[in-house]
Image: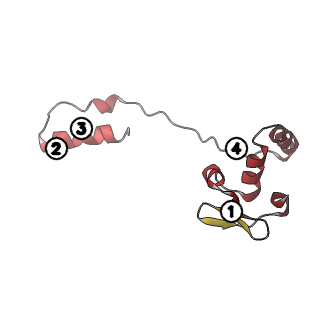
Amino acid sequence: MKALVPAVFNRANQEGITDRPNPAVALKCKLIQSRERFPEPAESPQFFAAVADSPLADFFLLAILIGARRSNVQEMRRQDIDAAGGVKAGAQIVPLKKKAKA
């Protein structure tokens, strides 16, 4: 969206719609730092203990064990789960690991 405003004013100036200076020049862009972080091996027991206490424990564990996106797990229906073959997560068929079958 931030790139759209200067582009619109530049185009308006080129087309002769306006001759006002581009007010978007004064906009400052704030750099966004990546929030990606992976848990350290020592953090795993604490993480799984916290997940076990959650009412959404099954959801979290299934998402982690099959590596599916949140939306794919949310869209799953019971008929999408085949313990012998795998699960249908969105458009993907994901093989179930032993722990996910339990």
**What residue is drawn where x is 81% and y is 58%?**
100
Name the mark on residue 71: none
**What residue is drawn where x is 75% and y is 71%?**
85
Q: Amino acid at mark 3?
A: Phe
User: Mark 2 and mark 4: span between their CA atoms?
Assistant: 45 Å
| Callout 3 crowding tier (Cα within 10 Å): few <14, some 14–19, many ≥20 | many
Occupied quadrant, residue 19: top left
**What residue is drawn where x is 54% and y is 37%?**
32
Q: Quadrant of the N terminus?
A: top left
Q: Earlier in the sequence, mark 3 or mark 2?
A: 3
Name the mark on residue 79: 1
| Callout 2 crowding tier (Cα within 10 Å): few <14, some 14–19, many ≥20 | few
Q: Amino acid at mark 2?
A: Gln
Give coordinates of residue 75: x percent, y percent: 61, 54
**Residue at image mark 3:** 9
Q: Nearer the viewer, mark 1 or mark 3?
A: 1
Q: Amino acid at mark 1?
A: Gln
Q: Earlier in the sequence, mark 1 or mark 3?
A: 3
Q: Amino acid at mark 4?
A: Arg
